[in-house]
Amino acid sequence: MLRRRRRRSKNETTSRAEKAVRAFAILLASVAFLMVGAYGFMLWFIEPPELNRPTIIRSPVRTGDPAETNGDVIELGPVPVHEEDGWRRDVYTILVAGEDDGFGGPDVIMVVLFDVGNGSIDVLSIPRDTIVNVPWALKKINSYQHLFRRAERYQHYDHYIYALRHGVANLVGYQTDFWITLDLDAFIELVDAIGGVELDVPQRMRYSDPHQNLFIDLHPGPQLLDGEAAMGLVRFRNYPQGDIQRIRVQHEFLRALSGQLLQARNILVLDDMVRIFRDNVDTDLSIRNLLWFATEFLRLDSENVRFHSVDHTIANINDNVNGVSYVSLFVEPWLELINTYMNPFTWELQAEDLEILTRDRSTGRFFTTNGAPFQNNWAG
């Protein structure tokens, strides 16, 4: 026997619709409450890193007034002046090293200057073959990783990154405030977390090294790179211009990666960034510090994230000593680059503030810009 379905009244239909809307509103309010609560907790939890910087002494800065003693005029020498405000406010510097290149040295060496006050980041890539004044025979900046324990003056370091930071300080004029060593898993996870990175691959990239478990097979053209493909792109080395061209490709990728991260600007990406860093990096920054840097990064405009390296106007990118290839810096162009983009001080760095091992352009002989003894024991 068929039962006739009771027809709902208009009031009943309206009542059910109102209940559905009310339930949906409650759901939205609950989600919003949880998100606001999570955001509030995040704001409470994050903490800017504490800077432990030395007092700056610039000498000579001024000369004292002449003084009379028994009728003789004595010229006073230079008077050191303590500049309490010698560091720029809200500026942080970080050394980033990627491990490793398969030969015992870091694959990537970068100095990051984060100007939180002005909302900008400058990233300087230092070529791995850059000449440095070290006591061992292979005088490349990335040799600190596997040779620093052999030299007496570096043996007190617990981690190669501190020796590397010393070497980088000679090139840029200051010890970075913090450091990060980044492994490949972190890089791959970060790219996959944002759904890949769109990039125009510049050339055919094919390389195989079972010893490193490295297999690269990329075709030229615009494409979406997942984590593994992106890792292959940034590690590929076979370019006509060698490491300098490789750094340019890395910068193009990092520019695209930064742009996609900044487009997202949400807590989920932030959570992924911090989790990946927590699980895959070695650093002297705390999780609270990393979260603070991540939130400040997500406030940036993509055009204020800039990348810098050397070219033929800043260095001899094809230098060679005893059959070993090097990049030797030209002092004045390098100083201009550092002072324009990478200087955390309120004053300009001078050549004597750095220990650059470079050639005299007229004679071809090597010398150091600060007069430090030249360790003339080259590999060959």
Image: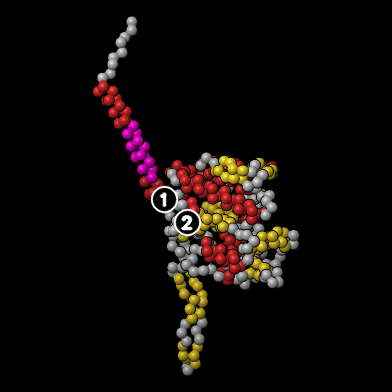
Q: Amino acid at mark 1?
A: Ile
Q: Amino acid at mark 2?
A: Ser
Looking at the image, which is closer to me, 251 or 211? Answer: 251
* Residue range highlighted in magenta: 24-39
Per the rendering, the mark at residue 46 is 1
Q: Can you tell which of label 2 and label 1 is closer to the viewer?
A: 2
Residue found at the far front of this picture? 221
At 47% across and 56% down in the image, what residue appears? 120
Decide: few, some or many residues near mark 2? Use Cα within 10 Å; few <14, some 14-19, many ≥20. many
At 63% across and 47% down in the image, what residue appears? 202
Looking at the image, which is closer to me, 127 or 37? Answer: 127
- Residue 360 visible? The answer is yes
Residue 116 image position (x, y, % from top left): 44, 57
At 54% across and 53% down in the image, what residue appears? 180
Q: Main secondary structure of the magenta part?
A: helix
Does the magenta-highlighted stretch encompass residue 26? yes
Q: Which residue in the protein does label 2 denote?
A: 120
